[in-house]
Amino acid sequence: MREVFGLLGVAAPALAVAQTVPTSAQGDVSLTIYNNDLALVQDVRQMSLPLGRHRQEFPDVSAAIRPETVTLNAGGTGIVEQNFDYDLLTPEKLMDKAVGQTVTLIRGADDKRETATILANNGGTIVRVGDHIEVLQNYGARVLFSSLPPGLRARPTLSVTLDTTAPGTRPVSLSYLSRGFGWKADYVALFDETAGKIDVQGWITLTNNSGTTFDKAKVLLVAGAVGDGNTGYNGGYRAQPPRLPGNRPGIESANRESLGDFYVYPIAGRTTVANAQQKQVSFLDVGGAPATKAYHFRNGWLSSQTEPQSADTVLRFSTSREAGLGDALPAGTVRVYMRDARGQPQFIGENAIGHTPMGSSLALKTGEAFDVKVQPVLEKRERIDSGEWEKSVRYRVTAPGKAPSEVTVETEKVFWRTTMSYKVTNAKAVPVTVEVVQGGLDNWRHDTRVPSESIKGEQRSVDERIWAVPVPANGEATLTVQFDTRY
C-alpha cells in the first residue's frame, strides 16, 4: 500500500502530502466577473459518459462555489443529485480526519519508527504511543499515513449523480456562481494646469481569492452592482462623488457592449486568472482632454472659525465624447499627478468616483490648498419681527359623532437674522477664484431668505448657497451675507 508522508512541526501539525500535482481538469473556461465579490464561471469539458445512473466528479471548481447555483447541460443526461466536497486536503484537516486511526511516527536522528494512535487534534496533536500519551506539538515528528482519509480531497470537487440515456463522449457545460472574485478600476491622471489639459490612463485590477486557478480563461468584467440575493441589497462599489459644484451625471451613450443596465469590459484574448493573484489590464488611454483647477470651501450652518481654514483644491473634467474622456468610467480611484519644475510627474492627490456615465462632469477634491484660506465668522444673531401675519387652521371635535369645528389662528412671522462674513486670503502670485458654499440652510423648514449679500450668490439647493469670490494675487477679499431664518 502506498504510504503518504508528512512533517509534524514544533508549533503545530504541518503535513505535506507527497503527491504529484495533477493538471487542471477544467475545460474551456469563461469568467464573468462583477464588482461585488461575485463571478459567473462557465466551464465546458469533454467527457465520456456511460449509460445509466452513475457518479461523475468535476474537480477544480472554485473553492468558493455557491452550490445552489450550479447548472449542468449534457445532451441525453439528467442530474439526479449533486454534492460539493469542500473538505480540502490541508495538514490540519489531515490530522483531524485521522483522529482514532493508527499512524507511524518517525523521529530522532536514527529515524526511529513507532506506532501511534491519534487521540485528538485540538490546538496540538495528542497521540497514544505504547503505554503512554504524548503531545506532539512540543516535540516534532514525521507522521506516516497509509492512505488519505475518505472525503478529504486535494482539489475542490463537485460530485454529480447523472442519469445518461445516450452514452458517449460529448461536451458537458458546467456553470455556477462563485464568491472570491472582484475587480476595480484605477485611473492615473497627469494634469497640466498651464495648458488646461489632462492625460488619463485607466487600469482594471482583477483579483481572484476563490481558492482555484482558472487557466486560459475568457474574461468579461461587468461594471455595476448586480443584486445580491444573499445579503438582500447591492453589495458592490458604492463610492459617491463628493459634494462639490461641477458634479453632474452624463446623458451620453458609451460605445461599449452592455448587458442589461451594465457595461461590459472584455479582456482581450485568453488569460490565466491565478488564485491569490492581482492582474492589471489597461482599458483607457486618453491624452489632452480639457481640465481645470478650482478652489472650494463649504461652511456648516452657524459654523465660525477662530483660524483660517484651507480651501479644497478641486480638479474638474468631463467624460463627454466631444470635450472629455469619451467613455463611461467604472467605479474606482483617480490618482492625480503634475510635473514639477524638473519635468518629473509628482503625486498631488486622489479621490474615488462611482460608476460614471459618459458625458458626466466630474469635480474631484485632490487636496487642501497651502496658500488659499477661508475664515468664516458668525458676526451677529438677532431676532426680527417681520410685522407679517399668517393664518393657520386648527381642528377640534365639539361632540361625538359630529364633524369637527374649525378654529383659525393668526401668528406673526418671526425670523432670526444671521450675519456671516467669510474672509478669503490668497498668498499665491496669481489671482484665484474661491467657491464659498454655505450649507445647512434647510435646517428650518426650507424657509431661509437672503436679504443682502456683498457678492451675488446662487441658490444651489434648498440647503446650500454658493458664491464665486475673486481674490487678487497676494491679496484678500471679504464676503458678507445675511440670512433670515424662520423658526
Image: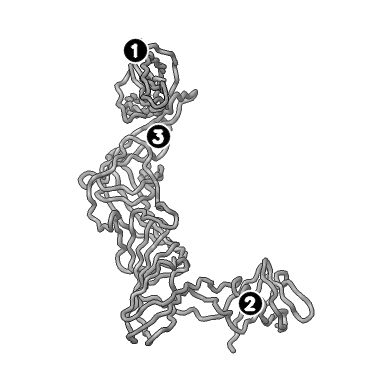
Q: Position of residue 380 (x, y in %)?
A: 44, 15
Q: Which label's residue is closer to the chain start, 2 or 1?
A: 2
Q: CA distance from mark 3 to mark 1?
A: 41 Å
Q: Residues within 10 Å of mark 1 (few under 14, many from 20)?
A: few
| Residue 426 falls in image quadrant | top left
The residue under label 3 is 312
- Residue 161, percent across and down? 43, 79
Q: Looking at the image, is mark 3 or mark 1 nearer the viewer?
A: 1
Front-lying residue, 26 or 113:
26
**Residue shown at 26% from the left, 57% from the top:** 258
Label 1 near label 3: C-beta < 8 Å?
A: no
Q: Is residue 93 left or right of residue 123?
A: left
Please name the residue that numbered disc 1 is placed on. Answer: 388
SS category of the residue bearing label 3: strand
Whichever of callouts 3 and 2 sits on the residue coming sooner in the sequence is 2
Kindly identify the residue that appears in the image at 24 percent across and 49 percent down: 326
Looking at the rendered image, the quarter that the N terminus falls into is: bottom right
Residue 389's image quarter?
top left
The residue labelled by disc 2 is 98
User: Considering the numbered disc 2 on the image, is that residue within a helix, a strand or a loop?
Assistant: loop
Task: Name the kind of residue labelled 1 in the image.
Answer: Glu
Image quadrant in which the C terminus is located = top left
Up the image or down, 201 lies above or below 390; here it is: below
Amino acid type shown at disc 2: Ala
Residue 355, disc? none
Q: Position of residue 483 (x, y in %)?
A: 37, 19
Q: Residue furthest top?
A: 387
Residue 288 seen in the current view: no
- What's the residue at 70%, 70% (across, down)? 137
